[in-house]
Image (spheres, rainbow, N blue to C red):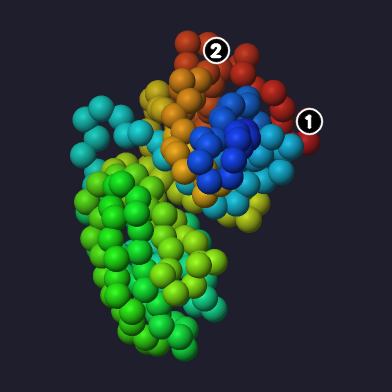
Amino acid sequence: MRNLLSLRVSRCGSLRSAPICVALTLPLLISATPASTLPMLVVDQAGVPLRDAVIEIRPPAGNTRRPTFAWRNAMAQKNQAFVPGTLIVPLGAVVAFPNLDNVRHSIYSFSKPGPFKIDLYGQDQTRTQQFKVAGTIALGCNIHDRMQGYIRVTDTPFAARSDLNGLADIEGLGRGTYDVVVWHPASAAQVANGAANWCWNPATAVGSWWRCGQAAANETVGSAGA
């Protein structure tokens, strides 16, 4: 069985400027998974799975693990779009911007954590940019206004992006208390909800989530096959 921490997300106000409102629902038991895997689900206010949400778990005190991720630090331009639309990179990463289109692009950002501009470059050429401050980098193209992309620069090794089904797994967390931060492209701001303080114990047979300070059994609301 698998204890899934479900994050219920609603958008507040306008698409570009308003923060996401986050409320954490109770754990829900579903399919099997290794005990060291932290499974998460992000849904909108209507309960629809939310794609491309960035979930960050603040590392425990004393953790010295440097952020590294399995995917490449690369944001391509393909079919006049940024691919992937949202990219998570570790603090200090040098990100490649390969142009896979047969037209030229000029990439820029005005975002406070890392403003930059890359002059026009053509097909099969690549440019790079380093990001030294954690936060969200909103990308645009000076030539193609409809192109939008996002780079999430993080200083935690415990981060993941939700898939088409709103699911994401974060590896390597031991038992403890963790703050959960959620960001989504629909918002220009990260969200750190004061209620997002949960305890995780991977040592149990299925792994357990519960609200810190409360008994785990009181927080379980369902299970597959129940």
Above or below for 104 versus 14: below
What is the number of the mark on residue 215?
2
What is the number of the mark on residue 99?
none
Estimate the x, y position of residue 88 in percent, counting from the top left.
40, 54
Sequence order check, earlier mark of 2 and 1: 2
Q: Secondary structure at mark 1?
A: loop
Above or below for 66 versus 141: above
- Quadrant of the image for the N terminus? top right
Of 90 and 139, the residue lying toward us? 139
Residue type at tag 2? Ala
Above or below for 120 versus 174: below
| Residue ID at (71%, 31%) | 223
- Specify whether 116 is left or right of 87: left
| Residue ID at (63%, 56%) | 164
- Quadrant of the image for the C terminus? top right
Residue type at tag 1? Ala
Which of the 4 image quarters holds residue 31? Answer: top right
| Residue ID at (24%, 43%) | 65
**Residue position marked by numbered label 1 in the rendering:** 226
Is there CB contact under 8 Å for labels 2 and 1? no
Label 1: how many residues lie within 10 Å, few (<14), some (14-19) or many (20+)? few
- Specify whether 116 is left or right of 46: left
